[in-house]
Image: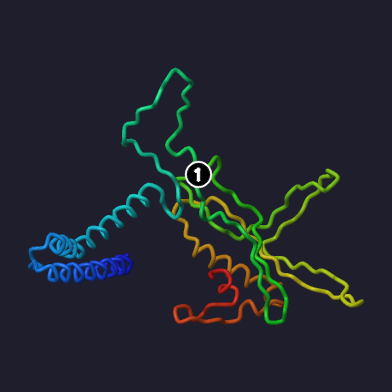
Amino acid sequence: IQSALADAENANKADLEQQLHLAIKAATDAGFESDESPKVQEIQKKLSTITSGASEHENAVFSHLLTFFSRYYDNGDFISKRRYKGNTYAIPYAGEEVMLYWANKDQYYIKSGENFANYSFKLADGRKVSFKLLAADTAKDNRKDNDLDRCFVLIEPHVRTKFDDEGEEYEQEYKPVEVIKTSSIVDGKSIDTEELIIHFEYKAMKKGTKQEILVQSAISKILSDNNVQQHWVDLAKRVPTEKNPMRTELERHLTT
């Protein structure tokens, strides 16, 4: 903010200094004392107020930012908060029907954490690993939960009842970690591929639950899976950083 205001201040100052130079020259050419010229005095006054005006503009910008975030930002989400005091409005009325609107009628709760998407990456051997969101339990009716935190969690093994294309009911088992094998024909040859699927869900948790702790718990469970330990060992390969020398390939993709 200070940099932007300084750029504007310097541009205005340079323009005024140019105007002052021309005004002094015009007064001198006309045989007047430049200090007595109304035009020169006016420009000098504007120059003297530029520096003090910059701090006022800076204060105004921060004031507007504070007002905006106090009205629309809460714990990582943008939401119109109720305000119980404000201006008084006069409604024009000429006998016709009058429709009253809430002040935030066209504003919506933007749940910034709900841009859900599956994520995949490939290991050095070309095999694919995918994080898939099995379920997303979100706040209903555009309301924000006050006593819950919604977090990404590794699913527990369970069975779900589903329906096929013909409406027939069947049960499908879901595991937190599973390997999907597929075959395809490439240039007349059968190619077998494997994909490691890791299932997460976005669910309501007790207030104060930390996503970082849930991620570490998920990493521990995934790396202890028998299939992962035997056939997907690259996930446990160290990819250290200065702050986290024990970081694994799996953690790198879960936290970046």
* 6 sits to left or right of 256: left
- Please name the residue shown 92% across and 76% down the image: 188
* Residue 206 x, y percent position in the rendering: 48, 51
* Residue 46 x, y percent position in the rendering: 18, 61
* Residue 16 x, y percent position in the rendering: 23, 67
- Is 73 rendered above or below residue 92? below
- Is 242 rendered above or below residue 80? below
The residue at the far front in this view is 30
- Residue in front for this viewpoint, 119 or 170: 119
Question: Which image quadrant: the N terminus?
Answer: bottom left
* 228 sits to left or right of 73: right
Q: Which residue is mark 1?
A: 108
Instruction: Give the mark count.
Output: 1
* 178 sits to left or right of 104: right
* Residue 92 x, y percent position in the rendering: 39, 25
- Please name the residue shown 73% across and 76% down the image: 127
Instruction: For label 1, count other residues whose C-alpha is less than 10 Å away and answer few (under 14), some (14-19) or many (20+).
Output: few
Q: How is the image coloured?
A: rainbow
- Please name the residue shown 56% across and 58% down the image: 152
The residue at the far top in this view is 95
Q: Amino acid at mark 1?
A: Tyr
Question: In which quarter of the view is residue 22 placed?
Answer: bottom left
- Residue in front for this viewpoint, 242 or 60: 60
Question: Which image quadrant: the C terminus?
Answer: bottom right
- Is 4 rendered above or below residue 239? above
- Is 179 rendered above or below residue 103? below
- Residue in front for this viewpoint, 122 or 1: 1
* 253 sits to left or right of 75: right
- Please name the residue shown 54% across and 50% down the image: 204
- Residue in front for this viewpoint, 79 or 104: 104
Dot 1: what SS? loop
